[in-house]
């Protein structure tokens, strides 16, 4: 399945809910998002039907996101059914990790292949600041459980925000003693552009990946660790656009996702499905296609037609667009 720019599109990110048990400052306002009615949200069986149609068209990889996907009821059953959908090769999840101790074993048994865990700081006080109500130890326990359960790889995602003054070096060192794949993600202009005190974005808070690499290497060399080197053999399996490095002898890697400083739009292979049934061709585009209406009012052919429309609407790149009508928790992280 190719878009009009010749890119192969084989990856669908599905937001199961816009609800979350945290209120991260770059993702969601403190009071949360407006309540959607029960009928607005795609039902589990509707998600499965959309995936079945998409798989027949060429989608092979699914990532479940939120909000926080683990607050959605029936998650393990959904994973099992998606894994068993003809044409689907892998199902993964992005989570904040807090509920992993409760669900990890069941998800592994259902066939979930890998998890990405969001964690922006290792400082407990700063974690409470970033999440507004979170406990760092809960996420660290979720990481431990993910490793013990056998998910592979386990990736840890950190959004880099200048005004937070995060300790990137200590964070990168998580990759040394355990097979954790730490990734630093440039702060993206999704949602309102109101700055770090809201759920928005400010240009002054963006740190280019090259600067983060320099900060890590300077600290590492000062402590006799040696600089990061490009990863080869230990590069983790996955579908994202990260560039991977590693400390010598480390079990894991350190990755950098650079949507602003190093555009990777020419390699984009994904579509996005929101919790309320809208298909989006690009994270930064506000154009949406209502697959829920097609699903509830027509046949699989109607769903396929919407998928074809969104595929052909996919832009060549995001053109440094700032701000989107919906926030990250509503689009799907």
Image (tube, helix red, strand yellow):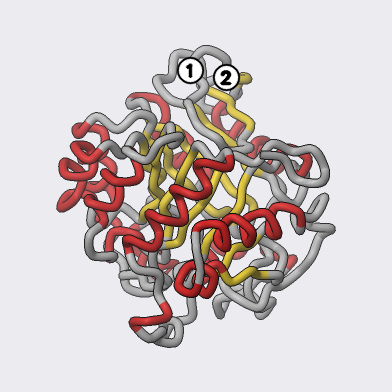
Pointer 1 local density, CA inside 10 Å: few below 14, some 14–19, many at least 20: some
Q: Name the side, left or right, on which 266 lies relative to 20.
A: right
Please report the residue visible at 17 percent of the width from the left and 49 percent of the height from the top: 101
Residue 234, numbered circle? 1
Q: Nearer the viewer, residue 87 or 219?
A: 87
Q: Which residue is mark 2?
A: 231
Q: Secondary structure at mark 2?
A: loop
Residue 28 place in picture, x, y as percent: 48, 75
| Residue 26 visible, this orientation | no
Give how far apart the Cα atoms at labels 1 and 2 are. 6 Å
> Quadrant location of the N terminus?
top right
Q: Residues within 10 Å of mark 2 (few under 14, many from 20)?
A: some
CB under 8 Å between discs 1 and 2: yes
Res 289 quadrant in image:
bottom right
Q: Position of residue 10 (x, y in %)?
A: 59, 39
Relative to 320, does residue 218 appear above or below in the rendering? above
């Amino acid at each position: 399945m190719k878009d009009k720019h010749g890119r192969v599109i084989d990856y669908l990110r599905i937001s199961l809910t816009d609800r979350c048990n945290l209120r991260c400052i770059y993702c969601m306002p403190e009071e949360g998002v407006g309540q959607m009615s029960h009928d607005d949200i795609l039902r589990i069986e509707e998600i499965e039907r959309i995936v079945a149609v998409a798989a027949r068209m060429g989608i092979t990889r699914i990532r479940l996101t939120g909000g926080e996907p683990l607050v959605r009821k029936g998650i393990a059953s959904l994973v099992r059914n998606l894994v068993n959908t003809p044409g689907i090769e892998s199902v993964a999840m992005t989570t904040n990790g807090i509920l992993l101790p409760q669900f990890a074993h069941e998800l592994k048994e259902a066939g979930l292949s890998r998890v990405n865990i969001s964690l922006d700081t290792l400082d407990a006080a700063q974690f409470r600041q970033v999440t507004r109500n979170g406990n760092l130890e809960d996420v660290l326990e979720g990481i431990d459980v993910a490793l013990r359960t056998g998910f592979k790889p386990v990736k840890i995602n950190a959004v880099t925000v200048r005004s937070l003054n995060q300790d990137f070096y200590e964070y990168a060192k998580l990759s040394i003693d355990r097979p954790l794949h730490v990734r630093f993600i440039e702060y993206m202009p999704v949602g309102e552009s109101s700055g770090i005190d809201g759920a928005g974005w400010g240009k002054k808070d963006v740190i280019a990946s090259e600067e983060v690499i320099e900060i890590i290497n300077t600290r590492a060399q000062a402590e006799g660790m040696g600089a990061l080197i490009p990863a080869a053999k230990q590069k983790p399996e996955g579908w994202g656009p990260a560039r991977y490095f590693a400390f010598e002898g480390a079990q894991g890697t350190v990755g950098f996702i650079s949507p602003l400083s190093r555009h990777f739009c020419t390699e984009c292979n994904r579509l996005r499905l929101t919790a309320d049934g809208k298909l989006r061709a690009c994270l930064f585009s506000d154009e949406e296609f209502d697959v829920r209406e097609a699903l509830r009012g027509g046949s699989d052919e109607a769903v396929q037609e919407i998928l074809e429309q969104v595929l052909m609407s996919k832009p060549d790149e995001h053109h440094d667009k700032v701000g989107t009508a919906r926030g990250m928790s509503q689009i799907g992280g």
